[in-house]
Amino acid sequence: MSAAVDLRAGAPKHFLDIKDFTPAELRALLDSAAHYKRAGRTGKKPLTGKTLAMIFEKPSTRTRVSFEVAVRALGGDAIVLSARDMQLGRGETIADTANVLSRFVDGIMLRTNAAEKLHELARHANVPVINGLTDLSHPCQIMADMLTFEEHRGPVAARKIAWVGDGNNVAASFIEAAARFGFTLHLACPPGYWPRAEVLEWARDEGADVEVTIEPEAAVAGAACVVTDTWLSMSDSVDQAAARAATFAPYQVTPALMALAAEGAIFQHCLPAHRGEEVAAAVIDGPASVVFDEAENRLHAQKAILAWCMG
Ligand code: CP
Ligand code: NVA
């Protein structure tokens, strides 16, 4: 683990962001994910007797189900908690919650509206904390995305991936992945919706090949994979929906846009998707789409993450 996360001897092995890991550590996680996928139901059970608490401040289908199934398949148990139903929702501090949960469970996964809460939880917990999505990042998703890319198109290093749409939390984790896995990432986002300057600056300092443009056609040119995500994330106000739909309309991933990518380019989306908004039905339901492999790979990638954190 990198020093940024693992300063204390015997500190819990948190999985907070892609950038906290070295390329070799991430590669080992991907290898482990592929191993778990091949092993299927006959895989090892390093979580036997262990319990993961999962706290959700926001809705989830894939993250909740894939983590729960992964923990059970690894021999452990999972408790799903809605922040609304916890004392956390009535003002109990994150620090106290972290200390209490650490007495009961062996790991905590958090999906939260505010990345600071994740980091505060990790500072106070004596057990590993896993990022199940914040307003700023979604690292578990990107591990599944890397696994999916490599299954379909071979090693991702030095390949070109295009992100089209909102420079959001998933885009930020893709940017971190570009630096760590060594692929070229060109993002096309409307003005005002570019990834955070801090993330872009970090990537540049790491020597990553990351560029942002306002032109989808330029971003996808020659890309081996085109990725998009919703135009309205869970942390965005629904009041913005109409204005965002208008701003993002030229950024829909259409068959015409896919035709500008490399021959045989694949299409990825973390889901949930909105056909006719960020992606045309003909693309997401067409032959280039690998979105359901990508969703399935959440399970395998998270088995690797859970085994590393808690095994
Ligand atoms: N991709 C993803 O994280 O999906 P959920 O919101 O359903 O968990
Ligand atoms: N950007 C989306 C991802 C959902 C998995 C959101 O935060 O709502």
Image: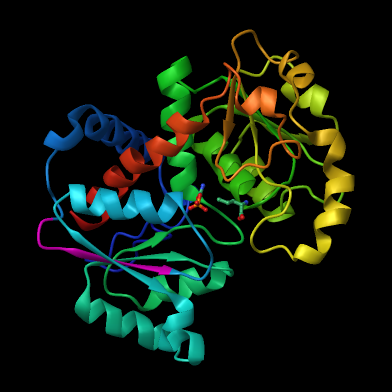
Q: Which residue occupies 61% across, 20% down?
A: 286
Residue 213 visible in the displayed image: no
274 on left or right of 298: right
- Foreground: 198 or 260? 260
Give the magenta part as a residue range: 48-55
State the scheme by which the image is colored: rainbow
Q: Where is 307 relative to 122, above or below?
A: above
Give x and y (percent) for residue 274: 68, 42
Identify the residue shown where x is 33% and y is 75%.
Answer: 125
Where residue 54 appears, as percent x and y from the top left, is 36, 66
Residue at the location (56% across, 27% down)? 183
- In percent of the image, x 30 and y 64: which residue is there? 128
Q: Nearer the viewer, residue 36 or 20?
A: 36
Q: Main secondary structure of the magenta part?
A: strand
Q: Please check the rendered image and state whether residue 32 is part of the magenta-colored stretch, yes or no.
A: no
Furthest residue in direction top, as rendered: 263
When the figure is inspected, residue 155 is found, relative to residue 162, above or below; the finding is above
Which image quadrant is residue 285 in?
A: top right
Instruction: Specify the quadrant of the image occupied by residue 137.
Output: bottom right
Q: On the image, which quarter does residue 289 sit in?
A: top right
Left or right of 242 in this view: 271: left
Query: Would you place residue 55 above or below residue 60 in this image?
Result: below
Residue situated in front as seen by the camera: 299 or 214: 299
Q: Is residue 219 visible?
A: yes
Q: Residue furthest bottom?
A: 91
Residue 202 percent across, percent down from the top left: 63, 48
How many numbered circles does the render carry? 0
